[in-house]
Image (cartoon, rainbow, N blue to C red):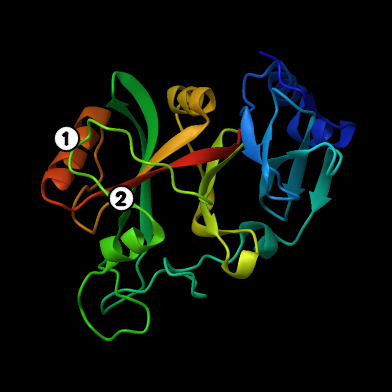
Amino acid sequence: MPRMLDVSEDVRAEIGDEEADRLLAGDNSPGSYDCTSCRTPGDSEQERTSTVLFVGEETAVLAFAHATCIPSQVVQVAEDQLQGAVRSITGSESAQPGTAGGDQAVLGVTSGLVLIEGDLHPALVVEPTAPIARPGSEGSTDEFLPLLAEQGFRHVSDLETLPAHLPGWSVLLAMGQLHAVLQPGTGGSGSVAWWQAHQPLQVTEGWRAAANRSSTVLVFAAPVGSIGQQPREDLLREALEKAAANGRLVAAAMPLAGT
């Protein structure tokens, strides 16, 4: 169904006629979204919606807003402002999550389709490269899963049931590439990047199509060494099932932001 989208000439010039026409046809635009201006929910099938393109020095992010809030436009912003400050799981300012001793950890992200309740669902699997310590602690205990549980992620015992939605979190996809996983900012400051791609990550057409159909992405997370780099989706599922059986997997469902 065509969406009630407004795409300005400036936005069209930046993203190209093909992408603009696909948006207007409803191929790539989510039905529901969080307005980039007022941060309240919107529905492009029910109300006029503006496409807003934020452009930095190297990054461009397509977002949606109520047409009554702001018109469709291109917004020039500083690159660091566009990417947002990557924060640790508890929201403290940090370039990357801290580790339980040693170098800083990086959150590795893998995309794949996971079969749950008879349907294929777009999923992201997050696994750090080193144990994650609680910020401010000097211990060596890996606190990655407890920290996520405090943010609302739920422990997964098997892959037979869809994870619950996590309010305020979302997955940012712009122009078919994965940019970030966003979490609520502190003090009502909007969304900030919990994980930010150094360079936008490509996803498969099947993953993108499934994400656009459901407007939801499942995010699984496991401690270092639980999943690994799996070359096929069937092997990824086996690794997820093993992690769940060992009590080393949490998950949440998040709305898709962007296209």
Snapshot quadrant of residue 90: bottom left
Q: Is residue 212 above or below residue 228?
A: above
- For disc 2, the neighbor class at 10 Å (few under 14, some 14 to 19, many from 20) is many
- The residue shown at (55%, 59%) is 184
Identify residue type, mark 2: Arg
Q: Which residue is mark 1?
A: 238
Question: Residue 67 at x, y = what percent?
Answer: 83, 36
- Relative depth, front residue between 42 and 25: 42
x, y percent for residue 119: 34, 20
Q: Is residue 167 left or right of residue 129?
A: right
Q: Residue at x 54, y 37 (%)?
A: 256
Location of mark 2 (residue): 154
Q: Give the SS element for disc 1.
A: helix
Compared to residue 126, the image places residue 214 above or below, namely above
Label 2 SS: strand
Amino acid type at circle 1 is Glu
